[in-house]
Image (cartoon, rainbow, N blue to C red):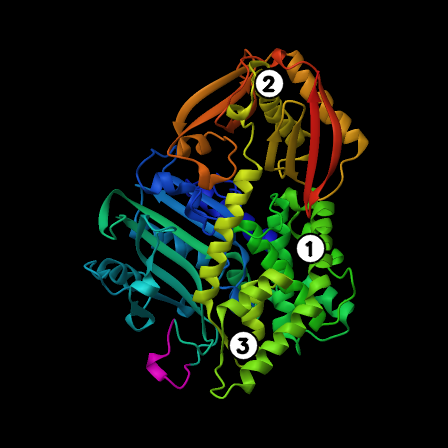
Amino acid sequence: MKSFELRKVFLDFFEKKGHKIYPSSPLIPADPTSLFTSAGMQQFVPYLSGKVDPPYKRACSVQKCLRIGDVDLIGDETHHTFFEMLGNWSFGDYFKEGAIDLALEFLINSLKLEKDRIWATVFKGEQSIPKDEESIRLWMSRGIEKDRIFELGMKDNFWGPVTTTGPCGPCSEVHYDLTKTPCKKGKECGPGCECGRFVEIWNLVFMEYDKTGEGKFEKLPKQNVDTGMGMERILSVLEKKESGYETDLFWPIIKELEKLSGKSYEENKRIFRVLTDHTRAATFAIAEGILPSNIDRGYILRMLLRRMVRYGRLLNLPTNWYVQPIKLISEIYGNEYPEVRLKQTDIITVFQIEKEKFEKSLGKGLAQFEKLLLAKSNQEKRTKVISGKDIFDLYQSYGFPLEVSKEMAREKGFEVDEAEFKKLFEEHKTISRKGAEKKFGGVGIDQLRSKAEKQIATRFHTATHLLHAALRQILGVSVQQMGSDITPERLRFDFSHPKKLEKKEIKEVETWVNARIKENLIVKREEMTYETAIKSGTLAFFKERYPVSISVYTIENSLQKVFSREICAGPHVKQTSELGKFKIIKEESAGSGLRRIKAVLS
């Protein structure tokens, strides 16, 4: 069974069982406390927590996810940075019995897996939460023998919450026996054993608790089910492959890298796997408008790209080796996720810019790293720990992400003082953000001297919102505001975009803004919570600066068609006809992956 067939078989099965098919939500979640969507249930948190009544009692989806907590494990048989999660949910409908029955029916009848190879784990009870006796009874009554059911604790068989608080509960994992041959542990060889005999294919989470800020587990008003089955893992089982890397999701890319490098996958498995994994993850991140930077999502993307540069050198790949793999990823995923196909040129451009940028300092950084190792080796105590300050200096001077330095250190038998690095990194981020707030403080209207200057600045402020909306309309929703500055003479707007705007695009942006001005749109202000604003589709930037209650400015016509909706402190005009004529006077680079527009009103 191929990947496209598996998606269809899964969704068709659960749709016939009364589940509403939900499309994948973006990798950038609405929840501002999470950097990425890392689980299929994130878009359903309001329903699972009982705070919002769901429109359907049953749901299913194939969700794209990105996790970086296991980045050190990438290259083994089961871990991936980007992956797809097949899931089904019950919101106060069926519970443990329904979830187990549906899982067994799908695995045995739809996927044709052997029942006597199916094993289960259940929650053994911990931290005042009782043992899951019901799941044990249900598995046994469905033909899973007692010796194929393992009891594990909170670490392995209690899931959630996604962040520090929220819905969670005990889970029952479904494992598949790949060999039917016990290792030296004999009867103790079971799910969780490191011998490679078993692979976890499905996690059935029984959400019946809400974890509070004080760390207490309180009962939810309704019992819910949240399940997740990794696409890559189940596909490797179905195709009888060693790992997901040998399936149709990765294999064409690996074969291309073999051709480009002249090296064998079998002899360089980990390097090939890291390269294909990171290329896929970075492709999806860039397709959603994420660009390399030194903070948050941008830092994660930069880390992935720079690890790729280093691994590409280990295989002695040609300069533009990444172009064909990106095209292959677009072919593999383009039908399911059109954004990777539509943004292919932009994705390649971002790869190219970041690769060139890192390569300029990579050689010098590697030389400095070798000096560090030599100095440590020559010390009398011969400590095997490199200070966080030394690693932070590598980051600041040569752009080496922590993860790259850690890996290089391990290869030489050294460890890194991560705690010290992270302390210095957080201090660095605080200083950088304060600088950004000062630099991109916006209108600065209180500092303007005359009433006329304040009126002009107010007009520019509203024009900035229209400009932002126009750029997203013309160039795509990957455009994000990265900074702005307004004077009585002009507005300046910095935004994410990988390449210079064409004259035609500049003209289209101007035309779009002036058309909205001519329509005399209404500019409306509302007070609401940050969470309410985000759920309503409001654009938000520099999220750490927003208080609980915020102002939202909406630019709409008399029929309430929305053209712009952003969190903003104001001030703004009442109607767009007050702006006059909009004219772009300059478009230029504002840094790697950033463009800058200067415009006037007349």
Q: To which residue does mark 3 refer? A: 410
Q: To which residue does mark 2 refer? A: 453
Q: Residue at x 37, y 78 (%)?
A: 189
Residue 35 magenta: no
Q: To which residue does mark 1 refer? A: 354
Q: CA distance from mark 2 to mark 1?
A: 41 Å
Q: Residue at x 39, y 72 (%)?
A: 192
Image quarter of the C terminus: top right
Q: Residues within 10 Å of mark 3 (few under 14, many from 20)?
A: few
Image x and y of residue 471, in percent: 67, 31
Magenta stretch in the rendered image: 182-191
Image x and y of residue 429, in percent: 50, 52
Q: Residue at x 38, y 71 (%)?
A: 191
Majority secondary structure in the magenta region: loop
Question: In terms of image quadrants, where is residue 460?
Answer: top right
Mark sitting on residue 602: none
Between label 3 and label 2, give the one nearer the viewer: 2
